[in-house]
Amino acid sequence: MVGTGYGLIEPVPGGVAVLGSGVISTSADLPLDARIHLIYDGIRGLLEAHTPTVLVLEDLYAEYRFPRTALLMAHARGVICLAARQRDVAVMALAPAEVKRAVAAAGAASKHQVQHSVRRILKLDALPTPSHVADALALALTGFSRLGGRLS
């Protein structure tokens, strides 16, 4: 929960353009409520500035080797869903394997493979970094594809 990646895309003739991407950062030294508040404020600001129609996030899965990580992700996910609901933005949750299959053609693709695939699809000059940003853009691309958009 130290870094929550985001990626904003929109369809353009011949593909998809990146409107923005980055990481909402928090400090592990902050209390949990302060970290959650920073994530909420960051997402709310992005939703107000860009008015998306859909917010795509990673679905939680039950096989976490570290239950504390799952719990922290659930907190972040909750405030992200709340911010979306307050702005009447639909929420789509996707399984990590589905996202990897959609962008890298393999459900077990590595983070590095996802970064390279996102770079190719979006015709970026450099790899999207950190991996949280690549993951967020991959989620956005997969959501776009699921809603009928075409990934090149």
Image (spheres, rainbow, N blue to C red):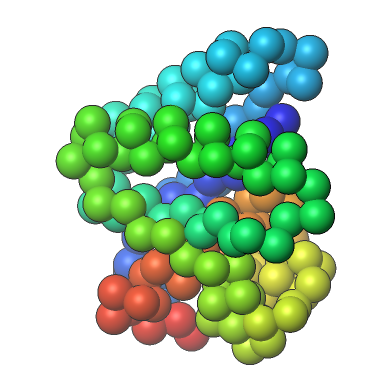
How many numbered dots are placed on residues in this image?
0
**Residue sitting at the far left:** 88
Give the residue at x 70% y 71%. Answer: 114
Please state the horizontal and vertical placement of residue 17, each as a whole percent of the image: 44, 62
Give the residue at x 61% y 75%. Answer: 97
- Residue 24, above or below 77: above
- Residue 93, above or below 150: above
Name which quarter of the figure residue 134 lies in: bottom right
> Position of 47 compared to 35: left or right?
left
- Residue 91, above or below 72: below
Please state the horizontal and vertical placement of residue 24, each as a whole percent of the image: 60, 31
The foreground one among 72 and 121 is 72
Give the residue at x 40% y 68%. Answer: 143
Please state the horizontal and vertical placement of residue 64, each as a whole percent of the image: 73, 56
Residue 111 visible (yes or no) = yes
Name which quarter of the figure residue 93 lies in: bottom left
Name which quarter of the figure residue 136 lies in: bottom right
Give the residue at x 54% y 34%. Answer: 76
Q: Quadrant of the N terminus?
A: top right
> Position of 33 compared to 15: left or right?
right
Residue 17 visible (yes or no) = no
